[in-house]
Image: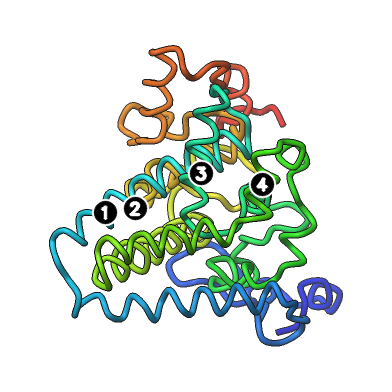
Amino acid sequence: MKSFEKRVSEGKPELEYEKLVMSDVVMVEKRSMFRGGAWRSLDVKMALWFLAIHVLTLFAPFTFTWGAFWTAFVGYVLSTMFGISISYHRNLAHRSFKLPKWLEYIFAYIGVQTAQGSNILDTITNTFDKNKDAHSPIYGLWFSHMGWLFDSAIIMENQCEDLKSQAFYRFIKRTYVWHVLGFAAIVYALGGFPYLVWVVGVRLACTYHVIFMVNSVCHTWGKRSWKTTDRSKNNWWMAILSFGEGWHNNHHAFESSARFGLEWWQFDFGWYVIRFLETVGLATNVKLPTEAHMLKKSFTSTNE
């Protein structure tokens, strides 16, 4: 498919672009992870790791036990809600609240066990639909889902400097793989192959794809409640799976807000945890959108 700029210069009408099924999103340029770009060693390692995790999940039907299942489920809740949503996203990427350092580091270490890269690299991939949006479905649904992961140029252009200044995060970055493999070794030693399959394989595969669907699904299907310059949408079933991350249009409208589910009926389990931590005095400087900001972002507002 021709690039967006070239098609525009040729005067091609928008209707000629490929429209995603049951969505108003139009794909203007399809990016392939196999063509048109150079793979770095980091990209190859990432691809091999994801392949290994998904191969491991193929053994799930043959190794099922209730113990392994529930351990994997608890691990999914901890890693997805505490590690990704509360720590990596709301706390580290957007600084929407503050925690005591000991608790910040505990939550961040839980995030380490999602095996998506070090904290420094993970928080930076939260780019919006601006000049270089890795998650935009206008480059193809697959690319917005996880194809961007195999383009280390996108990742390495956006490293989070304030995390790099802290000894804890520098240590995690240097020794990252040993924390992930060490945890897998402990799981295998305590529970054998069935627990390795479920707690490591199934848990990680579920965590990966739920978080990736926030990028792909929530930029493609759902409802827009606020005026934003991107394609973010609110999707209720994704919000349940991701503990609040599915209220993506809310988040893009008020990116520094610790609360994603802004209506009483918008379930946001990550916010409930933060609110509890605030109540007991552990979370401070909790940011929420002001009435003036909400009015400005409302579709009924005439302000830009």
In the rendered view, tell whether residue 246 sits above or below residue 155: above
**Which residue is depicted at the point 14% across and 66% down?**
65
Q: SS of the residue at dot 4?
A: helix
Judge from the rendering whether residue 78 lies leftward or rightward of residue 99; answer left or right: left
- Point out the residue furthest to the left here: 66
Residue 5 x/y as whole percent? 82, 71
* Quadrant location, the C terminus: top right
Disc marking residue 76: 2
Q: Spatial distance from mark 4 to mark 2, Cα to Cα?
A: 25 Å
Residue 303 x/y as whole percent? 69, 27
Q: SS of the residue at dot 2?
A: helix
Which mark sits nearer the N-terminus, 2 or 3? 2
Question: Is residue 16 visible from the viewing direction of this image?
Answer: no
Which mark sits nearer the N-terminus, 3 or 1? 1
Which mark sits nearer the N-terminus, 4 or 1? 1
Q: Give the residue pinned by disc 1.
A: 73
Determine crowd level at label 4: few under 14, some 14-19, many 20+ residues with C-alpha closer than 10 A.
few
Q: Amino acid at mark 2?
A: Tyr
Q: Give the residue pinned by disc 4.
A: 171
Which mark sits nearer the N-terminus, 4 or 3? 3
Q: Spatial distance from mark 1 to mark 2, Cα to Cα?
A: 5 Å
**Which residue is depicted at the point 63% across and 35% down?**
94
Judge from the rendering whether residue 7 lies leftward or rightward of residue 240; answer left or right: right
